[in-house]
Amino acid sequence: MATRRSSAPPQADAGRRSVTVEGLHKTYGSRRGPVEAVRDVDFDTRDGEFVSLVGPSGCGKSTILHIVAGLIPYDTGTVDVGGEPARPGRREVGIMLQKPVLLPWRSVQDNVLLPAEIYRLDDGASRNRAQELLEMVGLQGFEDKHAWELSGGMQQRASLARTLLPDPSILLMDEPFAALDEFTRERLNAELARLHETLSRSVLYVTHNIPEAVFLSDRIVVLKARPGEVLEVVDVDLPRPRTLDMITHPRAVELSAHIRGLLGQTERVEAA
Ligand code: ADP
Ligand code: MG
């Protein structure tokens, strides 16, 4: 069912890798001494593939995502993103974090247009694209509102539209919907699945929510905690398009139980 080195799903371009991480190690220095966060982690994402990093809190998911985004340094290993070593500020790499970080004094539309200023994109084309994206994420009619006038879910929709504005080929997402209520999170996950299926961008997604990872992903990199190490890479052989009723699909339930079992085993070893 699951293999450490798994084959590409049929919808992905098996020839090209968007993210390759090999032999990654990261230790933080802290006042109480070194904290080994990530140990010898290997995984990749292929073009158009949705890959999740799953594991308990503190297993190094955010550390890995921030390293792939080029936001923090690492000790040893190779991190290749779209054919180049990881570095920040690349138009082809979109990043979305747990907090929406919209600028409060700007309208929704002007927040979505922020990357057009950063990357000096054509103004007219960017405005058209912003409008398309706002419709795609269900925010038409809210263009002129300010961030503080929106609910948490709507702020994350605006944030998603902003991330997509420069048309990135790789999306890096760190628990983007974790702070939202369950109903909103499910709806946004269904929309993210639909967007991924329409746009076929590579996504590297971080979550501690196992059913969410199963619902969204083509493959799941299961990490154990202290230090973060890959336990297994699980193929998610659920059909696409994904619809919300698939959360209770027998295969989805089976895969979730398998991942829970993997993580449970390491907890029992630690407790012994
Ligand atoms: P996750 O996202 O899976 O919850 P993190 O990547 O945030 O995990 O953290 C992994 C480990 O590294 C944890 O033990 C955490 O306490 C530690 N850590 C994270 N950031 C720092 C930091 N800036 N300094 C020291 N330790 C850190
Ligand atoms: Mg985290």
Image (spheres, rainbow, N blue to C red):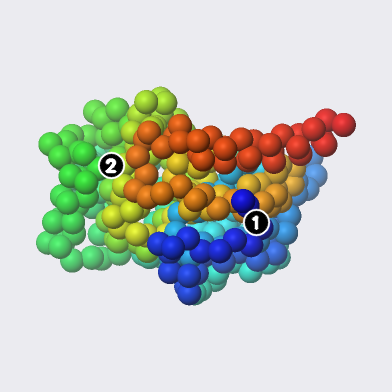
- 196 versus 42 height, above or below: above
Where's the C terminus, which quadrant? top right
- Dividing the picture into quarters, in which one does residue 215 lie? top left
Q: Which residue is drawn at 51% across and 49% down?
A: 236
Give the foreground label among 2 and 1: 1
Q: Position of residue 32 (x, y in %)?
A: 79, 40
Residue type, mark 1 in image? Thr
What is the CA distance from the residue labelled 2 to the residue labelled 1? 37 Å
Mark 1 crowdedness (10 Å alpha carbons): few <14, some 14-19, many ≥20: few
Q: Residue at x 70, y 64 (%)?
A: 23
Residue located beneath label 2 in the image: 158
Mark 2 crowdedness (10 Å alpha carbons): few <14, some 14-19, many ≥20: many
Q: What element carries label 2?
A: helix
Q: Position of residue 12 (x, y in %)?
A: 43, 64
Q: Which of 91 and 44 is in front in this view?
A: 44
Q: Is mark 1 on a helix, strand or loop?
A: loop
Q: Which mark is residue 3?
A: 1
Q: Where is residue 81 in the image (x, y as percent from the top left)?
A: 50, 67
